[in-house]
Amino acid sequence: MTSAAAGEVRGQIRQLCHRGLDWAALREQAGELIRRVIPHERACWYPTDPATLLVTGSYVENLCGDGSPPLSWCEYAVEDVNKWSFVARSPWPVGILCRATHGHRDQSPRYRELLRPQGIGWELRASFVADSACWGTVGLYRDRGEPAFNDEETAFVAGIAPTPGEDFRRALLIVDDVMLPAAAKKAIRAHAISRKKAEQEDRRAALAARRALRVLRGGRPKMSARVAARVLGLSHQRVHQLAQHERTRG
């Protein structure tokens, strides 16, 4: 992967994620772009319910399910490394199987029961997180005999992960071809509403802090920040934080 190619694909993914595509179109086109810089033979994509981290749809490419344990068993029924729920909560939203097992891939039930029987040697998993919620996941796979996923490829996926996360959120709200359970749709909308309310509360707190600063600057110099906080219904610490931010602005 050259830096020029990585930059070009990164820009194309950003453009793609502002086109208002549904989940299927987004997954297909993003997958083609990623394959340009990270070659792989097989892949799987899943939209997820951000409230429960349960998958709500699926797309698999060159992965055989005959005689293999289902995803639900691999992801929810057994202990394993790099589960998507764990990756979604990690600061680094990408997991490499061989690294998580310190080179002993057979320690992973997923590898023993699902990947190795299909001739797969290498796995890269990523969770698409936006506003601290996971809206989708992807797994990329290479066969034994192919090179392992390297640091550059891992960093590339980690760098683009928030961008598909934002668009997966939008796509799941307009999805037609993936039939989400009503509870999942309700959870997605509830998360978006709660996020909006939190942003509104933060704006109101910032406004209150500016008013407190004016009081402290103005004709009542004996009013302490603690008293101002009590009057305005804010925490003492919050007044100090936002007032300090106001001072740096003005």
Image (spheres, helix red, strand yellow):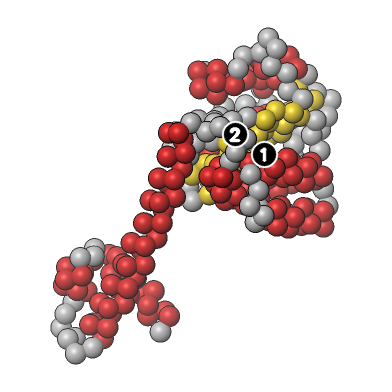
Quadrant position of the C terminus in the picture: bottom left
Where, by quadrant of the figure, is residue 61 drawn? top right
Q: Residues within 10 Å of mark 2 (few under 14, many from 20)?
A: some
The number of callouts visible is 2
Residue at 63% from the left image edge and 29% from the top image edge: 58
Q: Measure the C-alpha gap from mark 1 to mark 2.
A: 8 Å
Left or right: 247 as drawn, with respect to 16: left
Left or right: 54 as drawn, with respect to 218: right
Point out the residue furthest to the bottom here.
219
Nearest the eye: 181 or 118 = 181
As displayed, is residue 210 above or below residue 175? below
Amino acid tagged 1: Ala
Nearest the eye: 123 or 107 = 123
In the picture of the structure, the residue carrying the numbered disc 1 is 24
In the picture of the structure, the residue carrying the numbered disc 2 is 178
**Mark 1: which secondary structure?**
helix
Q: In this orientation, does residue 96 appear?
A: no
